[in-house]
Amino acid sequence: IPDVHDYDNDGDGVPDTIDLNPNAYQVVTDNEFFQLDLVDAQTETDIVVDLQIRPRNEQHLWWTNSILDWPDADNLGQHQRMTPNTLGNGDGDIQLLPMLEITIPYSSTNPAGGLPVSGTPTITATTPITTWLDTATTDQYAMSVRLGPNGERLVTLPLIPITDPTGGGPVGWQARIPYRLQASATGWGNAHEMRVTWFVNGQQDSCIPPANTAADYCSDSANWTSTTTLLQTYPETFRITGLTVSEHQGATALLAGQTPGSGSANYENELWHLADVMQKTWLEGQTVSGVRFPLRDVDTTLSAWGISNVPTSESDNLMDEVALFNAVDLTAVTNFINTNLYPSAPADGTTTTVLIAGEESYRTVYLGTLEQVDIGGVPTIITRTLFADSVMTVDFTGKEMTTNGMLRWQPYAYSNAGWQPTDLGAHVDQLGVQLNQVFTDSVLESYQLITAGATDTAEERAGAIMLAQNYYLAMAAGVNAPLQNPEPEEIGAAYPLPTETAAAIVYALANKVQNAFALLNLNGQTFPTVESGMETQGTAAWDALASSVATVVKGYGQLAAGSNSSALSQALTELSYLPRISIEQGTYEYLTDASLIFANEQTRAQLGGNGSSTIASVIATTYPLATGAVAAYGHIWYAKLSRAAQMRSIIMITPAGRDTLTRIPALENLMISLRDDMIEIQNEIDNLRKPAASPNNIKESPEIRVNALKKRQAGRLAINYYLHDWYIARSMAAEAFGFHPSNGVLPVALYDKYTQYQEGLDTLEEYMDR
């Protein structure tokens, strides 16, 4: 059971933060070996097995790659040392290396044993390994393969130490094993046996006297030669602390930049538009004709989005995440800039922004997991990993593919005949200077960022610049997100290039803040203060922020100027929970919400005295805080979507769930009816609470609002429903309405009406619980 207060949830000795499987481990046969078997693995896909293990004697972890010293001047026995040659850091001539040994029996159904193959050779039990092994792949993992006496493939690869992130001490070993089933393979074949072995490598000296030399020729150490050789092997006992097996279905990388001198003279407006549209389409997992919109189709869709000055470079069919990262590293970006943006060397100090996107698809199985899948229309529970009779079976049956996306951009500067990433804070501050030329009064007014006819617009302009700068920062931090949207939408709307992209993006950011304050006002929230005068000002500020985008931008402008004394700026500073509102309302957008997180952190840092009014002065503080928050909220958002999809799946396999689903239309009608009943009851209660002199003057009670009642009542009813305390549930619900049945003044007809309403709620709760 996951425990947030336990740093090692499964007690396997590997901290959760670096444990491949924080909630599971596996003891192996005799603590010495296990066999790996894959079920329903696909052919012609790159398969990677990530294995974490820990020796039964944890002290052995400290032996990893250690250097020992054999006595000098030893020319007797099997191991002789006469030369001064050393290994490693020069402290000795013997090294202890933990290795993973894999024995792959020959199988006619899988002749290569799943090892990567170069070309399409015919492989038998005795075919030399060198004629078919894809060493370009195996060499990346320091893997060696040799042929055994019975046709088995004998594989060795090093175990890499895993260190505790807090103390730095070793806590385990890890290995990555590459596989790739040939197209002709009809199965995994016999299971692959895996053991941990210590290799003792050392300097071995020898002296072979030439013919007709003196008898004491070998007495001189200068006549001895050294070779590094395997001296001995020893078995190690261990257990599995982590295991994941991933089928990589390919990856795609995309680089994009705006042609110099095109579009806006002050910023890369078309590149900003591309980032904005990619967030709304590709990053949201939207579909075209029911099929997810892939990254490889972005370059062919640019014209439909009004983009004509953004060259792109696409790398498709990449093997895995390693190849993906290589396709977007500094070398690849430099080549892209030199080829597509600046074929001739620009002046020193020239800057450009490159958008970097990546997409990777895979199927992954984790140790100790169960999963419900649909097989032939039948919901089926699959045990993904099962250890029995020394065999660890990893089952891919019905496993769906996962696709992750990465979207960010990076500013680069040219200097000394080369391109390098430039200082982000200084670049964004300079961007603010340039955007000051963009946000003219006419632009601000056309995007409702100022009120019509406004003359003093300095604060609104400063607010627009601040929000645009934080959008750039959010894009620089980037997003890593799953692209499988459980509820995808069709890309139906066009995304034309706005007249002013930065203004359109700022409007979207400010509009999100406006909607948040409108929602808070609707729910009857109050400004958090204990002073009545301040409360009046605060409430007015919330009302103003809820009423217009221009007011929101004005408030951010006051914050940008370093003022937190106004009610507007105070309210915006406290809006740290906006991402939670977005997640709860189902409106979370990765880059939009990330931009507002960055803006919130910037204002807090500047108003807290951690810097001047420049972003460069506070970015060392704000960037790690904001990026951490963005990552956390992104995971929470996707987890919410995943849980919804999983809940639907679970409901479908339970009789009560299917029965409830068939009643959804009736339940919706019941909810509508209950809402109407509640409003009617509320009106009668309000009427009863009015002074006797005006019995017919019916108006909404200012301290009791319908939406607030719904929220309070639903929460209290839900809690007490599960406590099975019906009397308290009814009493608390009545109190939420502002009356008590025991006060002796409640009309009988109203009490009966409320009782019927409560029975309707009980029915609804019963079906919701089922």
Image (cartoon, rainbow, N blue to C red):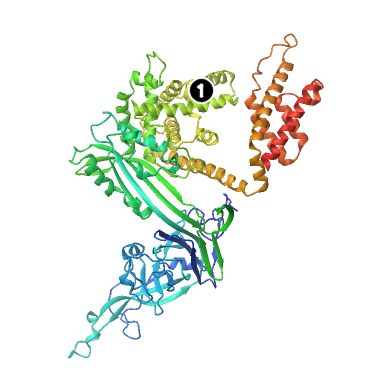
For residue 671, side relative to residue 276 (left or right): right
In this picture, is 516 found above or below 422?
Answer: above
Residue 264: x and y in percent read 28, 28
**Residue 407, quarter of the rendered image:** top left
Residue at (38, 53) in percent of width and height:
250
| Residue at the spot of label 1 | 546
Q: Quadrant of residue 739?
A: top right
* Circle 1 SS class: helix
**How many marks are shown on the rendered structure?**
1
Q: Position of residue 327 (x, y in %)?
A: 31, 50
User: Residue drawn 72% across and 38% down?
Assistant: 721
Q: Residue at x 55, y 66 (%)?
A: 387
Q: Position of residue 166 (x, y in %)?
A: 47, 53
Question: Looking at this view, is 459 or 766 the one in front?
Answer: 766
113 to 493, vertically: above or below: below
Q: Is residue 19 visible?
A: no
Res. 257 visible in picture: yes
> Residue pushed farthest top?
693
Q: Nearer the viewer, residue 159 or 219?
A: 159
Depth check: 681 or 567 in front?
681
Q: Is residue 561 above or below residue 229?
A: above
Query: In what quadrant of the picture does the C terminus appear?
Result: top right
Where residue 25 appears, as percent x and y from the top left, is: 54, 61
Identity, as a three-letter code, of the amino acid under mark 1: Ala
- Between 415 and 73, the residue placed more toward the observer is 415
- Quick check: 524 left or right of 624? right
